Image: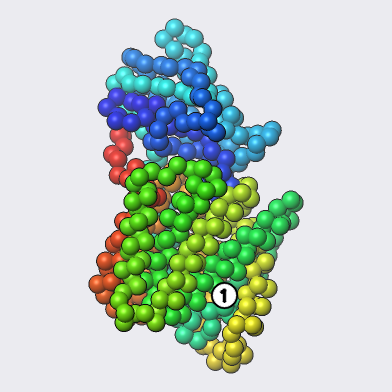
Amino acid sequence: MKPTGASTFTVYEGIGWRAYHGMSVLSVNGRSLDGRWFGAEPEIIVDLRGEGIDEAIKDIATAARDYPHADEYRVWPGPNSNTFTAFDRIERNTSSRERVTFSPVVHVRGGGGTLERQLSMKPLDTFWAVAVILIWGLNFVVGKIGLAQIPPLLLMTLRFSLVVILLFPFLKVQHGRMGQLAVVSVALGGLHYSLMFVGLSGIDAGPVSIAAQLMVPFSAVLAWAFFRERLTALQIAGMMIAFAGVYVLGGGAERAPQAPYLLSVVGAAFTLALATILIKRLGPISIFTLNAWIALFTVPQLLAATLILEGGQTAALRGADWRAWGAVAFMAIMVTILSHGLYYYLVRKYEVNQVVPLTLLTPVAAVVLAVLFLGEALSFEVVAGGVLVVAGVAMIQLRFEWLRRVPR
């Protein structure tokens, strides 16, 4: 649809994999019109133009947001992408009183009004979004505090053990998907968190929070490889800038001893991107059920890893004070359970390009909090590398779409 004065079309579509990742099936974006689905030529069912069409655009936008199956998707018997286009609220009387039902591809052009394409975020939800940013930023600071007394693999074992206890009621058997959940747990719990906190044990929290953003370019590459999602020139440039930022974070020869820890964080970013792709293939699942099963499958992996690769566990547990146990509780309750639940609540309620720009503030929050609470130095490498990484990630993830002024 393209209202008067708009420079591009706005495309409404139902996309199944979004539900698999805990997001709304409904996608509103400004991508190219008439995209080919596995090369199939689109068929234009209705092409409406002229006077009065702006009112139709408003009605369609309102009806699309009222789609009752935005949280579920099944290929057969539905609801699926065809269910969305056939939704009986997405219809309009033409000037000739002909009843038109909009389906697969609909072109609606111009008249004399505006398109209200997004819901404004409510003040309470804005508060939750800010809370998520602060919790994620504090995660690196609190993790650093916990690592001062407990080895990284043991710390993660304790974290996920507590998650299992707290989310036990959500451990509902997922028929036909238990094997997939086990695989996800290896990528997410066994590898991602191990690599992330091993890296955090050797370098400052601020640089770790910045380097962790490489998950976004890695996700873009994997989405291209697995789902054939198109990579734009802007996204490719963003990848190059983001990786250049991490190189700047690495510093010169004086920081060479920290290089293995930084590479560990980069590896953690890659395994998180891989886990995200695997989660997409799971199908619709509650975020709490997902976290519960991943935690249950992860605990024995991390327990074996800490027993084989680390030492002094008994002494560490005996010597841990309230700060270490507080770190375990914070990461399990506030990060894994609360912040993830709030984040998926927000992306299900609002458009992704309303929520994602806020999450780009996470490394900023982490760096500031690390300076305030841990006394970390705000060096040139951290500032310059951080700016490059965040800018590159923004180019990949947002494609500047959120910067476009939306008519109200």
Q: Position of residue 25 (x, y in %)?
A: 54, 40
Residue 316 position, x and y percent, is: 56, 89
Q: Nearer the viewer, residue 253 or 335?
A: 253
**Crowdedness near tag 1: few (<14), some (14–19) or many (≥20) residues, C-alpha within 10 Å:** many
Tell me the quarter of the picture where residue 52 sits.
top left
Is residue 84 visible in the rendered image? The answer is yes
Q: Quadrant of the C terminus?
A: top left
Q: Is residue 41 above or below residue 344?
A: above
Specify the quadrant of the image occupied by residue 308.
Answer: bottom right
Amino acid type, label 1 = Met
- Count numbered badges in the picture: 1
Label 1 sits on residue: 156
Q: Residue furthest top?
A: 96
- The x and y percentages for residue 153 are 57, 78
In the picture, the quarter occupied by the N terminus is: top left
Which residue sits at x=33%, y=70%? 249
**The residue positioned farthest toward the left in the image shown:** 380
Q: Of residues 241 and 126, which is closer to you in this image?
A: 241
Coloring basis for residues:
rainbow
Residue 117 placement: quadrant? top left
Horizontal and vertical percent position of residue 40: 54, 27
Report the residue at 69% width, 33% height from top: 77
Q: Residue at x 37, y 29 (%)?
A: 9
Q: Nearer the viewer, residue 59 or 318?
A: 318
Residue at x 67% of width, y 67% of height: 296
The residue tagged with tag 1: helix, strand or loop? helix
Q: Is residue 367 visible?
A: no
Q: Which residue of the protein is positioned furthest toward the front in this rendering?
A: 253
